[in-house]
Amino acid sequence: MQPAPLFRARLSSAPANGHVAFIPQIRKLVFEYCNDWPSSANTRTFLQRDLIPFARNNPHVEIVVKQRNRKEPIVRGFYVNGRDKVIALNKLEVTGIHKKLELLLDASGLKIKPLKRRTVESTTEAARGIWSGLHAERPQL
C-alpha cells in the first residue's frame, strides 16, 4: 500500500498596491484619429514623432492606434477595474496631448466623487443620545 500524497498549499498572493509593490491601474490606451481632418493634425504629429518613446517609457500599458474616419481624435484609457475614460484631443497641441496622457496614466479609473456636500453618517447612535429641549431640566433661578 502506498502512502497518500501530500498536497502543498499554493503560496500565492494577489498583487496589491502598497509599500512593497506598485501596480499601475491603467492597462490600455487606444488612440483614434482621422487621416484627413485638420483637427487630427496634432494627434498625427504626436503619433509619428512621440508615440514610440512614450511606449518605451510605459511598458506596462498596451497601446493601440485606430483610424476613425470623419471623427474628432480621442484617446481612451482602459483600467484594471473595468472602467474607461475618454479624452478628446481635437483642440490640443502636442504638449497638451502629453499632459492628458499623464493624467490618464496617473488616474485610478474610479468614478470622481465630489468632496464637498458629503454628509457624515454614523452607524452607531450618539453616546449621549439626541438632545431635545422638551426633555431638558428647567434651570433654577
Image (cartoon, rainbow, N blue to C red):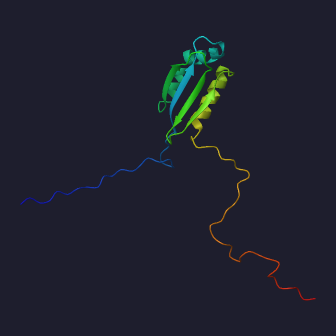
The quadrant where residue 43 appears: top right
State the residue in front, 5 or 131.
131
Identify whether 32 is placed above or below 131.
above
Q: Tell whether 79 sits left or right of 12.
A: right
Q: In which quarter of the image is the C terminus?
A: bottom right
Q: Residue at x 52, y 34 (%)?
A: 78
- Front-most of residues 36 and 8: 36
Quadrant showing the N terminus: bottom left
Q: In this view, does 52 lie above or below 134?
A: above
Answer left or right for 25 relative to 15.
Answer: right
Residue positioned most to the left: 1
x 73%, y 50%: residue: 116
User: Which picture quadrant has residue 83?
Assistant: top right
Tell me which residue sits at (20%, 57%) in the image.
6
Question: Which residue sits at x=54%, y=21%?
Answer: 51
Residue with the most extreme right position: 141
